[in-house]
Image: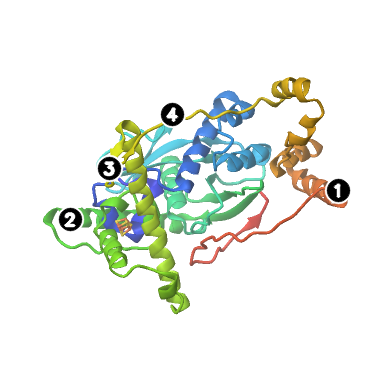
């Protein structure tokens, strides 16, 4: 199986993951959000923003990201979406495979493939091609050294004969808003990417050879294992699970750990949690088909349930006729921060949108119409510092 661009960073951390007979699973919310964003971009292209938003389930975790994207579409540079490329490590050449291929790549044995999010040609105020890759909230390697982004840039540079290309990671924030991390990759940076990809392919080949001979492989475990398609097949994970089962992790055992050891334990439990989730999801799917006998003689059986959703306008008329004003006490009205953002856009479309949104929030604050609460969310930040970053500006 040829490596794909979205797995390059993972493979660079653990080349043996490319040697195991992996099954592609969309295991993390980030991966599902990525697929959701691609589908959204495709639908925007085909049917327009409103129709594309209507296709996203209300409770989909990537809905807020797509709403943020929809809100800022007018200020994003125009260009071509979702074009697949393949880079040949044997010839240092690349080819354009085509747009909207839905990951159905037809590639040769020495090719690595991937699909760009957005490529904008030079134009007013932009002297070079600009390549944009969308991400969710979770921070990835900086644009200047991000291998996935660099790989796309390399493909485009080779196809179009470019020496330099601008690249950007655009983070789509849950509450609306974009964060840009920009860099320019020159001829040396592009050559460095080519060298990384070639070394990686060589390392994967070596790992496959060793695996076929039954030799021990040097697995690189870490938080990246959550995204590994080979997670459920990985001997290093089996070893980790055995070690944890032999000495179960309890709060009492964790309390005296140093911060470094506690950080290591956090990563191990996070990865094993993903392993357990994948196993449970597989068993759930199996049980949904024909049920499962349980050890105590009980049976796990699939039961079809109906979920009800009310269409407020019609339901209110029926209930009001029967219960009068009591209905006012049970109707829950809501207004989301995203909806306020969309309304603010009407005040100042384009680049003035951010200031207009802030002014509107200030007005709502002054009217005591905003209740704030804070919560703590845990996020991982890459070890390398971000070199270039501009908030909110395309
Ligand atoms: S689960 Fe982790 S250690 Fe195992 S193959 Fe995948 S990336 Fe490597």
Residue in view at x 38 percent, y 68 percent: 249
- Dot 4 falls on a residue whose secondary structure is loop
* Residue bearing mark 1: 363
Q: CA distance from mark 1 to mark 3?
A: 62 Å
Q: Earlier in the sequence, mark 1 or mark 4?
A: 4
Q: CA distance from mark 2 to mark 4?
A: 44 Å
* Residue bearing mark 2: 211
| Label 1 crowd bin: few (<14), some (14–19), many (20+), radius 10 Å | few
Q: Earlier in the sequence, mark 2 or mark 4?
A: 2
Q: Nearer the viewer, mark 3 or mark 2?
A: 3
Residue 123 can be seen in this image: no
Label 1 with label 3: CB-CB less than 8 Å: no
Q: Quadrant of ligand 1?
A: bottom left
* Residue bearing mark 4: 304
* Residue bearing mark 3: 297
Q: Nearer the viewer, mark 3 or mark 4?
A: 3
Label 1 with label 2: CB-CB less than 8 Å: no
Residue in view at x 42 percent, y 37 percent: 84
Q: Is mark 2 within 8 Å of ligand 1?
A: no
Vertical position of residue 293 compared to residue 261: above or below: above
Q: CA distance from mark 3 to mark 4?
A: 22 Å
Left or right, 21 with reference to 386: left
Q: Is mark 1 within 8 Å of ligand 1?
A: no
- Dot 1 falls on a residue whose secondary structure is helix
Q: Position of residue 229 (x, y in %)?
A: 33, 48
Q: Earlier in the sequence, mark 1 or mark 2?
A: 2
Q: CA distance from mark 1 to mark 4?
A: 48 Å
């Amino acid at each position: 199986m040829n490596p794909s661009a979205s797995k390059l960073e993972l493979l660079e951390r653990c080349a043996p993951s490319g040697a195991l007979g992996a099954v592609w699973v969309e295991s993390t919310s980030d991966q599902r959000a990525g697929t959701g964003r691609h589908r959204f971009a495709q639908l925007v292209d085909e049917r327009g923003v409103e129709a594309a938003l209507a296709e996203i389930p209300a409770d989909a975790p990537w809905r807020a990201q797509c709403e943020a994207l929809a809100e800022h579409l007018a200020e994003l540079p125009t260009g071509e979406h979702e074009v697949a490329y393949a880079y040949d490590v044997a010839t240092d050449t690349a080819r354009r495979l085509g747009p909207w291929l839905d990951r159905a790549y037809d590639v040769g044995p020495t090719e690595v493939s991937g699909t760009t999010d957005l490529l904008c040609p030079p134009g007013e105020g932009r002297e070079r091609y600009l390549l944009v890759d969308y991400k969710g909230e979770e921070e990835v390697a900086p644009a200047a050294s991000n291998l996935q982004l660099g790989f796309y840039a390399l493909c485009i540079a080779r196809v179009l004969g470019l020496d330099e290309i601008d690249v950007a990671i655009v983070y789509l924030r849950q509450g609306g808003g974009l964060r840009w991390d920009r860099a320019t990759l020159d001829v040396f940076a592009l050559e460095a990417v080519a060298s990384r990809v070639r070394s990686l392919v060589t390392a994967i080949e070596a790992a496959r050879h060793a695996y076929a001979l039954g030799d021990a492989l040097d697995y690189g475990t870490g938080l990246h294992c959550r995204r590994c398609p080979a997670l459920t097949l990985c001997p290093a994970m089996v070893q980790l699970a055995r070690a944890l089962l032999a000495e179960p992790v309890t709060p009492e055992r964790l309390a005296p750990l140093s911060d470094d050891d506690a950080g290591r334990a956090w990563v191990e439990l996070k990865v094993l949690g993903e392993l357990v989730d994948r196993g449970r999801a597989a068993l759930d799917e199996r049980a949904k088909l024909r049920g499962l006998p349980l050890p105590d003689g009980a049976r796990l059986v699939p039961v079809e349930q109906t979920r009800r959703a009310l269409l407020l306008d019609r339901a209110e008329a029926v209930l009001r006729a029967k219960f009068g004003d009591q209905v006012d006490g049970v109707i829950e009205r809501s207004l989301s921060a995203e909806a306020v953002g969309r309304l603010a856009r009407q005040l100042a479309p384009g680049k003035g949108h951010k200031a207009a949104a802030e002014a509107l929030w200030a007005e709502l604050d002054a009217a005591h119409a905003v209740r704030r609460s804070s919560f703590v969310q845990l996020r991982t930040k890459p070890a390398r510092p971000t070199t270039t970053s501009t908030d909110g500006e395309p």
